[in-house]
Image (spheres, rainbow, N blue to C red):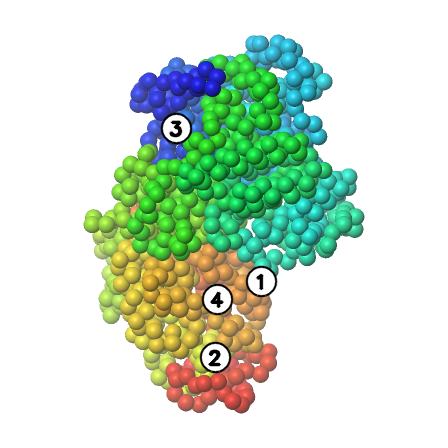
Amino acid sequence: MAERDTRDGRDTRDARKAVAPATEVAAALTAAVRGEVDFGAAARALTTMDASNYRRVPVGVVAPRDAADVAAALAVCRRYGVPVVPRGAGTSIAGNATGLGVVLDLTRHLRSIVSVDPAARTAVVQPGVVLDVLREAVRPYGLTFGPDPSTHSRCTLGGMIGNNSCGAHSVAWGTTADNVHELSVTTYGGAAPRLGKGWDGAPAGLRELVEGNLAPLRTGFPAGLPRRISGYALDALLPEAGTDLARAFCGSEGTLGVVTEATVRLVESPPARALAVLGYPDESAAAEAAAGLLPYGPLTVEGMSEDLVRVRGDSGHGLPRGGAWLFVETGGATPAEARAAATTILRAADALDGTVVTDPAGQRALWRVREDAAGTATRMPDDTEAWPGWEDCAVPPARLGAYLRDFRALLAEHGLRGTPYGHFGDGCIHVRIDFDLLTGDGVRRFRRFSEEVASLVVAHGGSLSGEHGDGLARSELLPKMYGDELVGLFGRFKDLWDPAGGMNPGVLARPARLDENLRFAVLPRERVEVAFGYPHDGPGGGDFSAAVRRCVGVAKCRVGGPGSGTGVSGPGVMCPSFRATGEEQHSTRGRARLLHEMLAGEVVTDGWRSTEVRDALDLCLSCKGCRSDCPVGVDMATYKAEFLHHHYAGRMRPAAHYAMGSLPRWLRLAAPFARVLNAAARVSPLASLAKRLGGITPERAIPRLAPEPFGRWLGRHMKARTEVFARSRSAVLWPDTFTEYLTPSVGRAAVRVFEAAGVGVVAPPQGGRVCCGLTYVSTGRLDRARTVMRRTLDLMEPLLDAGLPVVVLEPSCAGALTTDLPELLGDDPRAARLAASVRTFAQALEECAPQWRPPRLDRPVTGQTHCHQHAVLGDEADRRLRERAGLTGELSGGCCGLAGNFGFERGHYDVSVACAEDQLLPSVRAAGNGAEILADGFSCRTQLAQLGGHRARHLAEVLAEALKEGPQEGVKEGPQEGPKEGVKGELTEEPTEEPTERPAGGPAEGR
């Protein structure tokens, strides 16, 4: 299985040419280790890529349970000559964590914090510990782990050691290597040394190698570089450096051995922090100013230019005036001390403009712009793609301004665009560049640019890598930085640790070419036939391969929840199933990787019929959280619907697809028999039979049908009305399926509130026949969804011509109309018109009755912002309405876990409950009995009722109840345009005179 490297005569291992069959290796590993061994297509597909441009296919994945398992797995791989790659969260940007041979997944079991010693300020950790888990554990002692990459919520300590990660606070606390005391490692050859200072644990011959080459080791490494990550840190073994074996091992990118335990240094975390935000004319001016701020002792000096802000679309970002900014963080024992330090920097800085932010929420919002950059920068302002081909070089901080000018010039010379940002205080720059990595000419230009920019970095005294390591992206270029003699020593250093060449071949020593193993090479060149429009993917839209390429692997979707065991539960929605299970295949990234491999056809070989992709998507809740929370806007709910559409084409579907996927039809047919069916649902044998036939999990209760549909009530109500409302103060009330047949109380409440606010309600013609198509989309029945949507557009066209806003009370239906409708019917201009007309309850009140003041309730709230509203519609108007009503407090994020049909389907109950226990149920329990529980989604209310006996209500219901009870019903803040006498449901043009203000409270129901 050896493949000859013709450049130096050395052999490198290639698992794709293994002599032993994969089944034999898998059997031997299964017998040897207690952890999981998986050589299946799904496991391999999930680990072909990291967050880089590169892809290498492993033969299998092993999740060792402990250090003994690691040793056993390495012994088997050594026996069969199979390479090994240790892998943490897979967020490496240089291809370091892509794997030939066997991938060791160190995140599943090796994730314990063994001990914390606050007095010594140290912690002992296993390699799979997520950084934020460690930081949370030591927070009570006022301590933290200093290095903090932007991936801190999911990156692991083992990965940080492998790459010698740094992060924003390295100006204060250094790199990972600066914060490691000792390492326990296991080598491919079976040694298990404990590495620290001194020569104990060194492989035979290493001391002689260093002592015999003191001159090149003393002169071959560039000086004055706080971020020199490239190559091996052999200079850490010099006598004057203290002969630090642990430090030399850091940054070796899994090429020397596997870290099984680490003792790391902790630092004091300032109790208070402030942020000086400084504006400069351009990035070079900001870069030149950065070095001058270091003597003031900041915790961070981060920089970004207006390019990044434009990419994010943050036109109202609130940053100071300028074309580039420095974020300079200061710390102190008190808020006043931190603010004073930041103010001193603000006064000392020669900036165009600046401000000091002390509010923690304001600081988090600004830091999110910076931390999401690894994803947002992959999209240019015109929505074209950009890639991490030259991601993180570093130059001496004093040279950064000059380097950036030269770098921009080189980009222009090659006709490329990029968005630099990064750690200006350390001279380290991140940038995503719009390389064409899909064509031969584009790849050749990528190579030429990489070679030339490497020479530019070296000319400025810099390092090819300033944070993420060399990996497959830069290892080939190391001779430009170090020269042949020192690179030769790197090879000898590697051979002393790993003489068989089994650890992560192709990286650092005897590297692969930087234009090999590109992950895009395997994707189809022709467009894949799809149902959705994907308007933002590919030239002219409609390119499913481009949609799948959106996932660049930054893994923000891998933030753990209480059930995952993978990290501290974070805010937001994405990705509820990963937060529940901790399994990569149930993350947004994992599913995107499987879709990538499905299109490639090498590992996942049966295309749209793939069972691996189907199984991974089975636990996708279609919450759309990734559409907003993913920095690059991966929309897995749409991809899932697309996949199911193709997967079941011409085949029988699961029963739930017919039962719950056709819910609007069944409920319409069942409505006349609601009382009989409700009674039958209370008979246990009948309910069990119905659930079994419908693919519904037995743990769920069947929701009750409303005795009277909302539309019937609304018809009676409108006939009894006598008012005519001005066109600008009228809205169409969308009769969504859930409001129409299951909770008409929500619709009645909304009507009551709208009328109290002087807003006329108009019903769509044949109201019960309009449908957003949501249930058909979520089950992948896209042909049926389009039929339903076209009928809806036919019925809605007269109201669209009238220009009325369409109020949708159910957030999931509003999300479907806003996103799925125009993307499925892109050829029908009415779809875009209807999508643009959609308003939430709060948005409609704000738009149609801007001066109306709701009744004051003055009580706390709890509950949840619906995941589709979070992802698609936004909740700013809801927040303002709650504030005006005196409803105080924050709603939780996350997904309720019921998610329409998901939580009702057989096999999903446990995950559904785990999702609810992530954020929603704990927040409701913590709020106590006096809080109003708000949940605008039917699924959210049902989940709360069925799992906790909690009565949650739509905001409209809460306000409507207060209008009936309170004396200040419908009080307005200024003159209001009231309804004119006439026939309810008619619309008048704008009045030419100010109408007489009607009494507060509006027309009574049934007047």
- 3 or 2: tag closer to the N-terminus: 3
The crowd level at tag 3 (other Cα within 10 Å; few <14, some 14-19, many 20+) is many
What is the CA distance from the residue labelled 1 to the residue labelled 2?
31 Å
The amino acid at mark 1 is Thr
**Left or right: where does residue 465 sit relative to residue 108?**
right
For the residue marked with disc 4, what is the amino acid?
Leu
Disc 2 designates what residue? 728
CA–CA distance in space, label 1 to label 4: 13 Å
Q: Residue at x 65, y 56 (%)?
A: 319
Identify the secondary structure beneath mark 4.
helix
Q: Residue sitting at 48 percent across and 85 percent down? A: 990
Disc 3 residue type (three-letter): Pro
Q: Which residue is mark 1?
A: 888
Q: Mark 2: few, some, or many residues within 10 Å (few <14, many ≥20)?
A: some
Q: Residue 594 at x, y = what percent?
A: 36, 40
Name the foreground residue: 130 vs 380: 380
